[in-house]
Image (cartoon, rainbow, N blue to C red):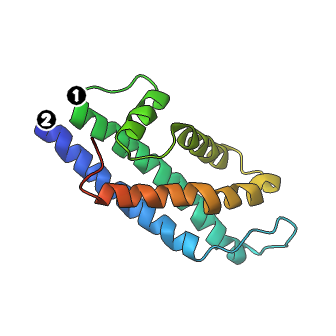
Amino acid sequence: MNDNLTALATVNRQKALKTINLLAASLNAFQPFDPSAPYTPKALEPYDALSDRFIRAVECALRYFRSLELSEFAEQSDTTRTLLNRMAKMRLISDPDLWLTMRNVRNRMVHDYLPEQTAQMFNEISTAYGPELLALEQKILSPTTSD
C-alpha cells in the first residue's frame, strides 16, 4: 500500500511540476491587463492561458500535497487549512493563508469571470501567486524540503 501511495505522490509531483512550468511560460510573457482596452478574442488568448495555467497549477499542487501527505504520514487532513499548515511545516509553502487566498482566486476565476476584477486577479497572479508557485517548484526539486 505504501508503495502505491509513494507512486501516486510521484505522479502528482510530476503533474505539479509540469503545470508550474507552463505557468512560468505564461508569466514570462505576461503584459499587464488593461480593463479599459478593447481586446480581440485573439488578444485575450495569453490571459486565458495564464488563467487556465494558474488554475491547473494550484489544483495540481493541492493534489500533490494530498498524495504526499498520505505517503509521508499515512493520513489525510480533514481540512485544506490543516493540509496547508502541514505543507508549511514541511517548508514546501511559505504561508497557508496565501495558499487559501490562491485557492479562493482559483475558485473565483472558475466560477465568476468578472471583467472588472480581471486586472486585479492577473496582477495578483503575476506579483504574488506566480512567484509562490515558482518557489514551490524549486522546493519540490530540492532534495531537502522536509524536516
Secondary structure type for disc 2: helix
For disc 1, the marked residue is 74
Q: Which quadrant of the figure has residue 67?
A: top left
Q: Is residue 98 left or right of residue 65?
A: right
Mark 1 residue crowding within 10 angstroms, few (<14) / some (14–19) / many (20+): few
43 above or below 125? below
State the mark number for residue 41.
none
Identified by mark 1, the residue type is Ala
x and y, in percent, of residue 144 in the image = 26, 52
Residue at 71% in and 76% down? 43
Secondary structure type for disc 1: loop
Identified by mark 2, the residue type is Asn
**Quick check: marks 2 and 1 in contact, CB under 8 Å?**
yes
- Which corner quadrant holds the C terminus? top left
For disc 2, the marked residue is 2
Residue at 30% in and 60% down? 141
x and y, in percent, of residue 66 in the image = 35, 37
Residue at 85% in and 72% down? 37
- Which corner quadrant holds the N terminus? top left
